[in-house]
Image (tube, grey):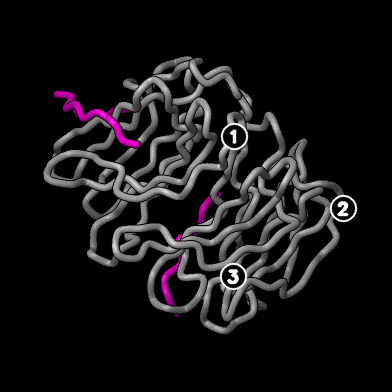
Amino acid sequence: MRAILTILVCCGVLATIPQPLTASDKPAEANDFRIVKGGRNVAEARLADPTQRYRHFVLGSTYEAGSLFTRLKDGRTMKLSLPRSFVFEDRLPRLADLDGDGRDEIVLVRSHADLGAALVVVGVVRDKLEIIAETPPTGRRHTWINPAGIADFDGDGRLDIAYVQMPHVLGLLRLWTLREGQLVEIASLPDTSNHKIGSRDIGLSAVADFDGDGIADLAIPTLDRQSLRFVTFKGGARELRRVRLSSPAVTDFRVEIEAGGPVVIVGLGAGRTQAVRY
């Protein structure tokens, strides 16, 4: 079965910092910027430099990130700082080899003061961090997207990226793949959400091969977060099954593997969960 990456889920200025990254480098007031560790060229990555210049604050904190720090396997550290018209409206750098060259890229949500949010792919290019591909922005200030999963969703052997555009009001699931240096949309599906407005939990989705066909599927709530949809992208986006939840999904999901196959543990808030089988 193909490897699956589960998410628990126009340019910057390069500067090099002399010290390796540690947890103590993280600003105390930005305690939800998560450090992610990788096993390929990128050893770890995190967002930093909290700023209030965008003031959307949809993620439950009164700041967004102004920069991205990375430490490579060879010990070099790099920083990508965004111009003042941009922020990283995100909390979690996502590492994935999107072009199949054996090196990880970094997937993030970047928002513009007037044009809204876009998905960006950051790579190490000629000894510096650069944004190497991006989706079109949502088109309007204070409109957001939330990544839902990275996997080979269509079975072509390359990783794809799923996100929900405006998960609080629109709920459009969109699937993108990196082709010849550009992000290309390959599928979409309405009536989805993977975030409760104002929450710090951005992982209300799960990736696994739920139907047993050897290709990754996505489990994601409906727009009202009252039901869980199992979605396949094989041959185009379509729903495989829908399960009513006992209460709306609120907190991060996880996948557990049981004898009968993968089970989605849906976070219902207040420490409660619901196990949903395909």
Residue 248 lies in magenta, yes or no?
Answer: no
Quarter of the view holding residue 128: top left
Q: Is 134 displayed left or right of 245 in the figure? A: left
Quarter of the view holding residue 2: bottom left
Q: Main secondary structure of the magenta part?
A: loop
State the residue at coordinates (62%, 50%). 164
When the figure is inspected, residue 167 is found, relative to residue 6, above or below; the finding is above
Query: In the rendered structure, which segment of residues is drawn in magenta?
Result: 1-22
**Mark 3 or 2, which is nearer the eye?**
3
Q: Which residue is mark 2?
A: 246
Locate residue 99, reporting x and y percent. Answer: 30, 63
SS for tag 3? Answer: strand
3 and 1 marks in contact (CB < 8 Å): no
Q: Earlier in the sequence, mark 1 or mark 2?
A: 1
SS for tag 2? Answer: loop
Q: Earlier in the sequence, mark 3 or mark 2?
A: 3
**Mark 3 or 1, which is nearer the eye?**
1
Looking at the picture, tell me which residue is in the foreground, 40 or 109.
Answer: 109
Cα–Cα span, label 3 and label 1: 30 Å
Kind of residue sitting beneath label 2: Ser
Q: Earlier in the sequence, mark 3 or mark 1?
A: 1
Q: Which residue is mark 1?
A: 140
When the figure is inspected, residue 15 is found, relative to residue 103, above or below; the finding is above
State the residue at coordinates (50%, 35%). 90
Q: Name the quadrant of the C terminus.
A: bottom right
Report crowding for label 2: few under 14, some 14 to 19, many 20 or more residues within 10 A (C-alpha). Answer: few
Locate residue 207, reporting x and y percent. Answer: 57, 63
- The label shown at residue 217 is 3
Report crowding for label 1: few under 14, some 14 to 19, many 20 or more residues within 10 A (C-alpha). Answer: some
3 and 2 marks in contact (CB < 8 Å): no
Kind of residue sitting beneath label 3: Asp
